[in-house]
Amino acid sequence: MKQTISVLVENRAGVLGRITSLFSRRAFNIDSLAVGVTDDPAISRITIIVDNGNSVVEQVEKQLNKLVEVIKVRTLDESSMIGRELMILKVSANAKTRNNIMTICDICGAKVADISPTSMTMELSDTPDRVNTFEEMMRPFNILEVARTGMIALQKGGGKI
């Protein structure tokens, strides 16, 4: 089962390396990793997606909390968080296929970022499942390139990490 771990850390060089090293030393695989500064420039938020059991996640939380630069660690429950992933996708396109591509973009909420005589580039920010669905729907149009971020997440409601 995929689990989302949100970590607030000091925004300093080397912190991300120490955190990923912790996972590597214990042979825990990271499915997705996204890092960005928060509203406080001294603090960064790291969102880590792992596909391991609850005991592994609890162990990871304990190990992360031992690191000096870690301010706070929280495992986010899927029902109590908002998670988004960004994808930029380029497909082959011509006059015959553009309307079909545009229809799929409209249905999925994707935005066209660039159009050339031979290709179209779209962007989509949504849940990982919907991003996956959009990518699958674009496969018949010959995907030329794809770039995806890791998922970012925040707790719903008034609570915060």
Image (spheres, grey):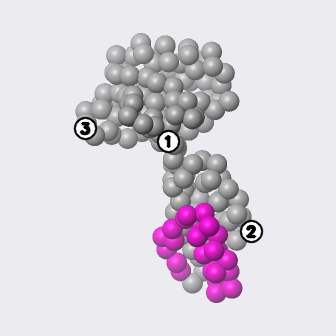
| Observer-nearest of 138 and 77 | 77
From this viewpoint, is residue 46 visible? yes
Q: Residue at x 70, y 63 (%)?
A: 137
Q: Residue at x 30, y 32 (%)?
A: 43
Q: Residue at x 48, y 14 (%)?
A: 63
Residue ranking furthest to the front: 157
Q: Going by the image, does 34 lie left or right of 24?
A: left
Q: Going by the image, does 21 lie left or right of 105?
A: left
Q: Report the amino acid beneath label 2.
A: Pro
Residue at which label 2 appears:
140
Residue at which label 3 appears:
41
Q: Which mark is residue 82?
A: 1
Secondary structure of the residue carrying tag 2 is helix
Q: Going by the image, does 36 lie left or right of 127?
A: left
Q: Report the amino acid beneath label 1.
A: Ile
Find the magenta span and give its range: 92-116
**Which mark is in front, 3 or 1?**
1
Q: Report the amino acid beneath label 3.
A: Pro
